[in-house]
Amino acid sequence: MEQYKEEFIKFMVDCNVLKFGEFTLKSGRKSPFFMNAGLYVTGSQLEKLGEYYAKSIHENFGDDFDVLFGPAYKGIPLSVATVIAYNRLYGKEIRYCSNRKEAKDHGDAGILLGSPIKDGDKVVIIEDVTTSGKSIEETFPIIKAQGDVEIKGLMVSLNRMEKGKGEKSALSEIEEKYGFPARAIVTMEEVCDLLYNKEIDGKVVINDDIKKALDEYYNVYGALA
């Protein structure tokens, strides 16, 4: 596993963003883990978060893109933090863009904030996590409505590796439906490999009981791919 991935997993735990226990998801599933990117709130946390996203985007998609699009609301700070980190790490200016939930009809009017998207732009979409692909259903037509735009891919922080609407994962379903790659900084398999029966700051994050709950969950909801 790459060093930045190991660091990112520990970072999620340190920031209390990745939790283990019993959680009811929006889908109604009872999950033994939960990720809440809204808990990245400090300057140092957002600085590090942007670096992890930038490294993963660079590794998966290279430098051949112009705009980083972060869907409202959580995607807004993600996109801003990441374009700053991308410039610092790789010396390339990437523009950020996000959507508004409601179009503004005065001043800086329209559905978008940040940089406009124009013909010929290559766009990477950035999100925290996706379980159903609903956000992309809303985001995809907004981006495509801006002109002759190529979407290079989607980057999320964690691949939950569970069924989306069918038997495949939400990220695989997005790839099949929209035709662009969908990647994650880390997968739950990588998380488990690193944290199972290993101490982080003196505490075992995934003990035998939590591992059993994870195995049972994936026996029911684990994706084929």
Image (cartoon, helix red, strand yellow):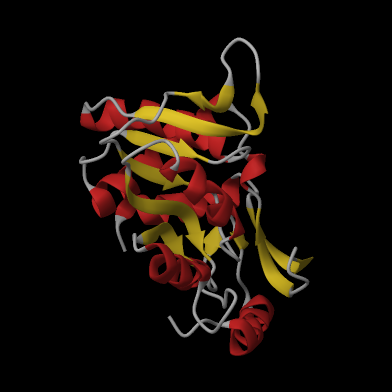
Residue 148 placed where, x, y %?
A: 31, 41
Residue 18 placed where, x, y %?
A: 62, 56
Q: Residue at x 34, y 59 (%)?
A: 180
Q: Nearer the viewer, residue 211 or 29?
A: 29
Q: Quadrant of residue 93?
A: top left
Residue 112 placed where, x, y %?
A: 53, 28
Position of 212 with respect to 151 (left or right) is right
Residue 204 placed where, x, y %?
A: 60, 65
Observer able to see residue 190: no
Q: Residue at x 35, y 34 (%)?
A: 67
* For residue 187, above or below residue 58: below
Observer able to see residue 213: yes
Q: Nearer the viewer, residue 177 or 19?
A: 177
Q: Residue at x 61, y 40 (%)?
A: 74
Q: Nearer the viewer, residue 29 or 73?
A: 73
Position of 211 with respect to 175 (left or right) is right
* Rendered-image quadrant of the C terminus: bottom left
Report the number of numbered marks. 0
Q: Residue at x 63, y 37 (%)?
A: 73
Q: Nearer the viewer, residue 148 or 9?
A: 148
Position of 186 with respect to 204 (left or right) is left
